[in-house]
Image (cartoon, rainbow, N blue to C red):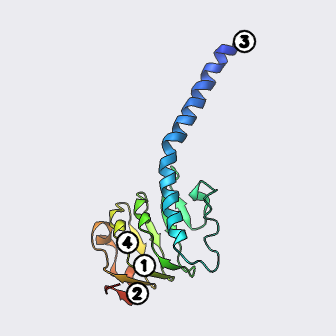
Amino acid sequence: MAPTAAGSLLPLSVIVLATVASTVLLAPVAAKDIDALLALKSGLHDPNGALKSWDPQLVNPCTWFYITCDDNKRVTRIGIARLNLSGPLAPELGQLDRLEYLHIYDNHFTGPIPKELVGLSNLINADFSNNNFCGPIPTSGPFKHIPRRSFANNPRLGKKC
């Protein structure tokens, strides 16, 4: 017996509802990651256009160069080393609660390392070396396990900004 029109619509409506609900529930999470990355980009000087793919119209930051995500499309890695970037790190990076790797060495970053980064409980590896950071070196949260060499060659780090 062939299914009736009404009978075939029920499973389809359940699928559509589930898809919409999962999109709505996941949207704020991805938006938070995008906002943090765009805050970083907006404060940086990028003379070579390395971060050109960080386009707010592309709502999935997992497609952006130098960004890696997990299966839930959450940012887990930022690898923007050796890109000739300059400027401060955005405090909004502290919102990237799934971030595990932050590699920003060999650039021209300035200012303090934002205190908001100490809340990144998943951060297991970071390299801030060969920049021009100033102010205190974070020592709490994930920074308890980041080796001192990850802060090397920042002549003003540990000194007042």
The spot of residue 138 in percent (x, y) is: 31, 74
Which picture quadrant has residue 159? Answer: bottom left
Give the mark, 4 or 3, whose residue is nearer the N terminus: 3
Give the mark, 3 or 1, whose residue is nearer the N terminus: 3
- For image coordinates 57% across by 35% down, the residue present is 19
Marks 1 and 2 sit apart, C-alpha to C-alpha, by: 8 Å
The spot of residue 96 in percent (x, y) is: 43, 59
How many numbered marks, from 0 up? 4
The front one of 79 and 96 is: 96
Marks 3 and 1 sit apart, C-alpha to C-alpha, by: 65 Å
Position above or below: 11 against 143: above
Which picture quadrant has residue 64? Answer: bottom right
Left or right: 68 as drawn, with respect to 146? right
Q: Nearer the viewer, mark 1 or mark 4?
A: 4
Under mark 1, the amino acid is Phe
Give the mark, 2 or 4, whose residue is nearer the N terminus: 4
Image quadrant occupied by the N terminus: top right
Mark 3 residue element? loop
Q: Which mark is residue 128?
A: 1
Residue identifier under label 2: 154
Neighbours of disc 1 within 10 Å: few (<14), some (14-19), many (20+) = many
Residue identifier under label 4: 114
Under mark 3, the amino acid is Ala
- For image coordinates 31% across by 85% down, the residue present is 160
Contact, mark 1 vs mark 4 (Cβ under 8 Å): no
Under mark 4, the amino acid is Pro
Q: Nearer the viewer, mark 3 or mark 1?
A: 1
The spot of residue 55 in percent (x, y) is: 62, 62
Q: Nearer the viewer, mark 3 or mark 2?
A: 2
Residue identifier under label 3: 2
The front one of 122 and 56 is: 56
Mark 4 residue element? loop
